[in-house]
Image (tube, grey):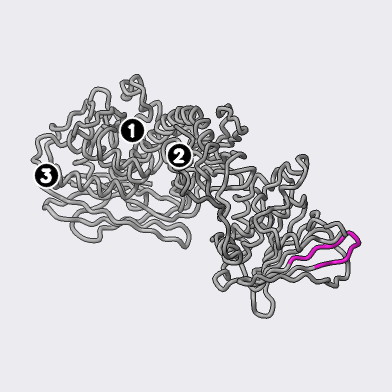
Amino acid sequence: MPKSVRKRKIKGVRTGKLRIADHWNAISIIAKSQANPLKAVAEFVENSIDARAKQIVIIRGKKKGEFYLKVSDDGDGIPKNTQGLPDFRRVATHICDSIKRQFKPEREEGIQGEFGIGLLSFWTVGHNLSMTSCSVDGKTYEMTMAKDSPNFTVTKKRVLLPFKGTDLMIYPLLPGLRSLTGEKIQRYLASELRDRIKSAEVTVKVVDRTGRKELIVVPRQFTGRLLHNLNPAETEYGDIYLELYLGDPGGSNQIGLYRRGTRVLPSITELEQFQKDPWTAGYLQGIVDAPFLNLTPGTRQGVLRDGKFNAFYRAMEPVENHLLQIIEDQRKAEEERSSRQILRRVQRALKEAFLRLPQEEYDWFDIHVGKSQKKPGNLFTSGPISGSPREKNNLGNNDSKDEKELDSDDVTQKQFFEYAGPLFSVLISPKSSVVSVDKRKKYRVVCRDRSRRLVFEDLEYQWEIVEGGGQIQGNNTDSVTFIAPSEPCLTSLRAIVRQGDTECRDEALITVTDSLLDPSSKDAGLRKGLPGYTYRRAPGEMWRSRYDVDKNVIIINNGHRDFVYAGKQKRRKLRYICRLFCKELVRHNFPGLQVDELLERMIELTLYTEEHLK
């Protein structure tokens, strides 16, 4: 292109430089950009740490009816001018030009301040600020500033003894900060300045004079298992420090983003690039410290999405893949552990339900038959608690052996530490039953203390028929035999148990009838013990569960939408699996019943079972 044409093309263009038209307006905007008063307090503490303080005391008190906040440290104090005086004038007249930038490299290490605007954040805390520091000759000087005022004053202040460091006081606090208690300041600083306090080996004390408390800021301790061998890719701007802990999933688990030991974001998921697993899985807590990130100067609670941030994000990609594998392994182990716990709780709830339901109608498996009952309350043994096929196939042969082992364990435990307390509750078993006319049935009373341990000693028993017909044999023992009358009726049986001055009672309902369910409809060969359960993933298929009779296992479809929904909460998942157990047991043990009758049985068993899910 000819030179004359190039000149004509830019001839009408005007150039210039940006500048601030109203300096005081710019300062006001900067001072009001910090919206979090606790963050402002943290910046005051950081200034003390930058001044190499080893003792920092934050005092919250009240004078003349107004609250105040004071921060005292034993650091180097305000930098001195050529006359050896605290250079307050430079602090007040060099906004956005931090003096810390002029420190030599060996002194700059570990220093956080870089913008020169931290002092202005007192506007979000209170109305007036005063800073006190000593000169080289020990004389004390004070600088005062006021909110919404461009003026400052520096005066000499009389004190009894010269001191080392700086005193900063804000008075009075804003009306909305009356709830800024010492506990809140302590908790915030423990997280916000966790690594800065640890690396600087500084002691931070919070003295709340209105609450009469003294609190030490202890850097936050994370829970869970510390993960090793997390090696983010190196960046051209520096290394990334990771300290991550793996634990049980929870909404409170967060990974904070830090820069040079100071928290930038409470959760790294506030960045859209990290709104995905493993960061949102809830299994991890800890810190990610990237010292080279550029912060938003106003709030210091944001990150600029520049080239340094892009390098940080790329370096974290291999860490994400490693964490995803760790979390997947944790989920599998947790699912196995949870399955064992759920099975025990569901089986225990079913057994409690069988104590209250009519034995003739719910004489399933080996719950009521073929067991030696050496003690009251030992009315049944559990089914399988393991998922191995060999254990499931050998259930019938191992029940009696398991029972003996359990009995032996109970005796050993009671000899050492498991002693029952005073009588708290009694239960008649069965709670509800059906007896044919002119027949006999045995009833027992189970006595427990407050912790549900069985009570045997110093008990007095009394049985009586409250309502209806029939007779009882053996009135003064833990068990009686009920003799049904010759006519159908509804009988209420009561047991009264006394232990000293304590008296507990319970009632059982007996239905005397002239017809019962045909016992031949029950398959005696199925009495193997309560079933276990296992998972089979079948997403898109509508079946929720199936009962494998040969293995005595309930197969649950963990790909069903209802299971996925229930699995988001432990309590909901437990109730869902319990209902699947009730459905399969009712369906299998009441063959030939109509649909409406099966539903009635389902509601009945679910009602008595879910009451004891704990």
Q: Nearer the viewer, residue 458 or 143?
A: 143
Q: Which residue is mark 3?
A: 597
Q: Amino acid at mark 3?
A: Glu
Range of the magenta residues? 131-141
Q: Nearer the viewer, residue 431 or 299?
A: 299
Q: Secondary structure at mark 3?
A: helix
Q: Is residue 298 left or right of residue 567?
A: right
Whether residue 74 is visible, yes or no, is no
As displayed, is residue 516 above or below residue 98?
A: above
Whether residue 357 is visible, yes or no, is yes
Q: Earlier in the sequence, mark 3 or mark 2?
A: 2
Local crowd at mark 1 within 10 Å, few (<14), some, or many (≥20)?
A: some
> Mark 1–mark 3 contact, CB under 8 Å?
no
Q: Earlier in the sequence, mark 1 or mark 3?
A: 1
Q: CA distance from mark 3 to mark 2?
A: 53 Å
Q: Secondary structure at mark 2?
A: helix
Q: CA distance from mark 2 to mark 1?
A: 58 Å
Q: Which residue is mark 1?
A: 371
Q: Which labelled disc corresponds to residue 274? A: 2
Q: Is residue 85 left or right of residue 459?
A: right
**Position in image of residue 477 (x %, y %):** 37, 49
As displayed, is residue 558 above or below residue 356?
A: above
Residue 530, located in which quarter of the rendered image? top left
* Disc nearest the viewer among 1 and 3: 3
Q: CA distance from mark 1 to mark 3?
A: 31 Å
Task: Point out the image quarter for the N terminus.
Answer: top left
* Disc nearest the viewer among 2 and 1: 2
Q: Is residue 451 left or right of residue 216?
A: left
**Position in image of residue 469 (x %, y %):** 18, 56
Q: Amino acid at mark 1?
A: Lys
